[in-house]
Amino acid sequence: MTVNDKRGPRTRTIAGSLLAALLLVTACTSTEPGRATAPHTAKTPAAYGDLPAGAAWYVRHISVGGRTTIAPPPTAAWIEFGAGDRAEGNYACTPFKAAATVTETAVTVGEKTDGAAPAEQCPTTNHAFEGKLRKLFSGRLTISRPVDDLTMNLTNQRGDYVALQLLRPKGLFGSRWELQYLAADDGGQIPVIGGTAVYYVFHRDGRVTGNTGCNDFTGRAVFDRNLLTMYRPVRTTHRTCSRELMNQEHRLLTYETNPRRMRYSAFTSSFSAEEIGPPPKSPGYHWSAIPEN
């Protein structure tokens, strides 16, 4: 028996268009073998803005002529791209400064000036590595992101490259960093009350200032490669707040060991620090950048 199709031409046309669109979407998104897949949109350097500028990076390894040389630990070789088209760092033994223009896709390294040789004896492996890095960190170097926004390769026209990893986040010095939580030994998080009122400002000269959520404080905080040494801070104001805030303030300003020596890990807009050594350890810190108004 034949069933008459009483739908008009317009209805059949719309239905056919919808079916075709559905088949096209299915073909583009299927992951079955033999089917077309949706194109993957890779992250480009432009997606990260000017992240290299204002951040410090340590050298993981270099590759010359297809041969990889691992950088000497711990973060002996590093580079910081600062304001005014300048860079500074350490080849592994010798500090340096250089003219360096940073764009979203490349770093162009100009004239370099080496600093004074270290007072202590530098290991032979460091000397060998810094000779290679000094030669490679020169001229126009293309920026690529092989893994994520915490790593960066700088590649010259021959295909040789310097592999970097984020050491200090952009704007570490002189900006307000909210203390989001304290990190316990067991991996738990101890909440901080007060929100952005609890903040630290780290200064290049080794000072740290901030607010506990109640009172202002000042102290010393020294960054050396991937190590942070914090000395017991003192209050500079003497306000009386709620019991909760006063208890929190006591915890933040009282160190069981003075100074606290910590290893820190950086992310693009936050960083964490925890004490070096076996448990039990005092809670570590996790700071996040407070956006500028």
Image (cartoon, rainbow, N blue to C red):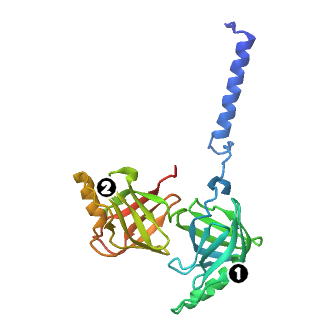
Type of the residue with mark 2: Cys
Q: Are marks 2 and 1 in contact (CB under 8 Å)?
A: no
Judged by depth in the image, the label closer to the viewer, 2 or 1, is 2
Classed neighbour count for the residue bearing mark 1: other residues with Cα under 10 Å, few (<14), some (14–19), many (≥20) = few
Residue 64 shows in this picture: no
Looking at the rendering, which quadrant does residue 109 occupy? bottom right
Residue 128 percent location from the top left of the image: 62, 87
Residue 263 placement (x, y as % from top left): 42, 71
Q: In the displayed orientation, state which residue is furthest to the left.
A: 243
* Above or below, 42 relative to 159: above
Picture layout, residue 10 above or below residue 134: above
- Which residue lies under the disc numbered 2? 214
**Which amino acid is tagged 1?**
Lys
Secondary structure under tag 2 reads: loop
| Residue nearest the observer in this picture, 16 or 234 | 234
> Where residue 135 is drawn, which disc sits there?
1
Residue 217: x and y in percent read 35, 64
The residues bearing labels 2 and 1 have C-alpha atoms spaced at a distance of 52 Å
Q: Position of residue 280 (x, y in %)?
A: 27, 70
